[in-house]
Image (tube, rainbow, N blue to C red):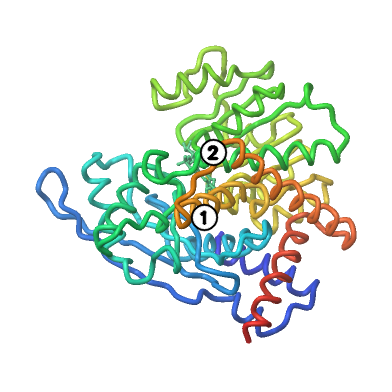
Amino acid sequence: MNAYDNALRQLEKAANLINLDKEVLARLSSPEKVVMASLPIRMDDGSLKIFQAYRVQYNSARGPYKGGIRFHPQVDLDEVKALGFWMTIKCAVVGIPMGGGKGGVIVDPKALSLGETERLSRAWIRAFREIIGPEKDIPAPDVYTTPQIMAWMADEFSKLVGKPSLGVVTGKPIEYGGSLGRGTATATGGFYVLEQAVAKLGWKKDKLKVAIQGFGNAGAIMAKLLYDAGYKVVALADSRAIIHNEHGLDVDSVAQYKEETKSLGGFKGSKEISREEFFALDVDILIPAALENQITKDNAGSIKAKLVVELANGPTTPEADEIMYKNNITLVPDVLANAGGVTVSYFEWLQNISNNYWSEEEVDKELKERMIPSFEAIWQMSIDKKTALRTAAFMVALDRIAQASKVRG
Ligand code: NAD
């Protein structure tokens, strides 16, 4: 299961349906630029370690490249290419005038001290300084990269260029050019589209049971939003454990427990279940919010949820997509469901380059005004073209990218 193969299959499927211009398809079938670097880092014990790092600048038809940096042991070039491609589609889905890119480092961030993490983050910026910048390519956080890491990165870049350059990365802390609402934006945007989908399906939300895989920035905040809104969160998963309580978990207590113990495992009043059991749970809504390739042909058939909202990037393989579509499962795709993150990243960048900062209410209002119409347009397209929401989202995005490519020549 190669994430990039999956991404290209998604592209091909939607491209065929809209008869996408062959030249645009060719351009979108490979990244514009791939840069690799070896980052030598002095470890706390005095030894030197080399870390492999990437930046993929996938497509800039609609504007500067935009996309996060992932620190994870399983990062590989094809994964970064897939993520860069999805960023291209995502920005077009929500109408952000930016292209797509992604970065990564092959590293186990949990094994690094704070000092080592800082040196690695600054080294990443030094390695890619020529190709990034507020008007060129604007990275952001992704799995296991944090606002603190973004602050080190913006600081390093500002030193290199000899002037404050806050717009070089987004997802920064509020004290250093961050936007109010950025930390919660991915989940909040996902929550808005989830509620739209629930309304379209004619469901009453107070009875709905939810299972969420991933308890980080995306998953934990989504869990809290749903819990506060009256949904019943019955299962939660992190990299170490999957916990379940059919009567509902107290998400605030779970978050506190995870903070203290660093794991969900052993949370009082829950029982641990297997991955297979998790995907087959008797729930209404399933939210993958961890990594790629989680819903595959092997478990898609067992899914009982009738609504899947992809907060993670690329959690579903194309085979699993087909199975769920046949089983009448409504799937809100990643390129729409998690686009709240890049949307508020764009707002952060706008605030940085204009040096004019917005209130939390303004950010939330603007986020809502992008997410809900984007959902409506894609929902309508899926009805008109009798296709899944993912393909509909790709159709909307590809059309916008094709128009930009065409006028640019
Ligand atoms: P994060 O580092 O904050 O959290 C990741 C979570 O996933 C952690 O709880 C971790 O324990 C869990 N996890 C890792 N491996 C797992 C496994 N095998 N099974 C179950 N859980 C596992 O990362 P995040 O920012 O929440 O990102 C999660 C997903 O959301 C990624 O696919 C990311 O690309 C996507 N995403 C995030 C943002 C954002 O703004 N943070 C925006 C768009 C998309």
Q: Is residue 2 visible?
A: no
Q: Residue furthest bottom?
A: 409
Among the 4 quarters of the image, the one containing residue 383: bottom right
Horizontally, residue 144 falls left or right of residue 377, namely left
Q: Residue at x 78, y 22 (%)?
A: 206
Q: Disc 2 marks which amino acid?
A: Gly
Instruction: Give the quadrant of the C terminus.
Output: bottom right
Dot 1: what SS? Answer: helix
Q: Is residue 194 visible?
A: yes
Q: Is residue 343 above or below residue 64?
A: above
x%, y% of residue 230? 71, 21
Horizontally, residue 309 falls left or right of residue 42, namely right
Horizontally, residue 141 falls left or right of residue 203, namely left
Q: Residue at x 38, y 50 (%)?
A: 71
Q: Is residue 51 above or below residue 259?
A: below
Which residue is identified by label 2? 181
x%, y% of residue 217? 50, 38
Q: Nearer the viewer, residue 295 or 65?
A: 65
Instruction: Give the quadrant of the N terminus.
Output: bottom right
